[in-house]
Amino acid sequence: MKLQKFYILTAAALLIGAFTAQAQTTALNATAGPFDNLKHDCVAKAETGSEVLLLNQGDVVVKSFDACAAGVADKAYVIIKQSSNLGKLEMLIEDLRGNVLARAKVTVREGYNGLVTAKLQADVNKGERYNLKIRAISTDIVIEGRYITNEKTDLFLNGWKLDGNISTAVGMQEVDNTSAAIQSERNPYSNDAIDARATEFGATFSVYPNPFVDQLSVTFKKDLKGETQLILMDLAGNMLHREVRLNPVVGQKVNISPMYTLNPGAYALSILNDKRVYNQTIMKH
């Protein structure tokens, strides 16, 4: 029963067979716009499509990309349409010699549909080609894609070359080696100070669900004194929603329901209290 919905979605691919790469694809509706609001200096992304690739447990799909910045590839994104059960996606970046530059594992819950993000720290050189490798662990995954394209990147499934792409993106930040302090301030994804603040955020607040659809909730894990503002913004800094609470206590929940219709993608949640600012990136389906 657990896999019933999953196999309904992938029935066409399964019936065709697994002996050719093209047999792994079937038509589904595309997810529009999830890569449009990513906050990076540049993004190497593949066009989203209306077809899918079936990734069975243990399967590995490899997608090449060209680095658009001289610096760090710090996040990788992939759109999945369905997962059979609780498992993980391993995402790593390799150079063309097969050297692993960065690796991360992301938990995927049963029946998940949406954007999966892996935080990586891979040093890249602008204009050079790299591979984004994705492996399914303890789950079957349906990944969105598009086939029979004219893109110059390469796609392989377990060594078989496919004619097309899967819906992925790799976000990159320029790094100025002569001014690490300035770079750390400008680049919130690649410095230890921000990682520490992210840990502090998790110890003070709980945000659910993330990604969200129409509404998300913030639950306080600590008592805070004074006025606390909860602000939802787009990545250009435009305020989309604001809530204010006075002296919030442990367990208190605040629901955030934006009055605007938000496009799928990344947004910023800022919580201000006593001259302290806590930030977290959240994703909208």
Image (cartoon, rainbow, N blue to C red):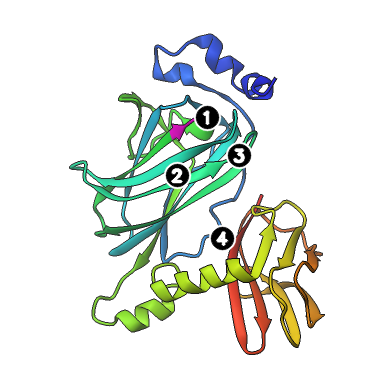
Q: Amino acid at mark 3?
A: Arg
Return the x and y of residue 141 as percentages of the image width and height: 53, 30
**Cα distance, mark 4 to mark 2?**
15 Å
Q: Is disc 2 placed on a helix, strand or loop?
A: loop
Dot 4 or dot 2, earlier in sequence: 4
User: Which quadrant of the view contains residue 61?
Assistant: top left
Residue displayed at 63% across by 24% down? 6
Dot 2 or dot 1, earlier in sequence: 2
Residue marked by disc 1 = 139
Q: Amino acid at mark 1?
A: Thr
Residue 160 vertical placement versus 128 (above, below): above
**Cα distance, mark 3 to mark 1?**
9 Å
Return the x and y of residue 120 as percentages of the image width and height: 39, 55
Residue marked by disc 2 = 46
Task: Considering the whole magenta stretch, tell me its main secondary structure.
Answer: loop
Q: Is disc 1 placed on a helix, strand or loop?
A: loop
Q: Which mark is residue 37?
A: 4
Residue 126 vertical placement versus 271 (above, below): above
Q: Amino acid at mark 4?
A: Asn
**Cα distance, mark 3 to mark 2?**
24 Å
Q: Is disc 3 placed on a helix, strand or loop?
A: loop
Return the x and y of residue 190 as percentages of the image width and height: 39, 68
Residue marked by disc 3 = 109
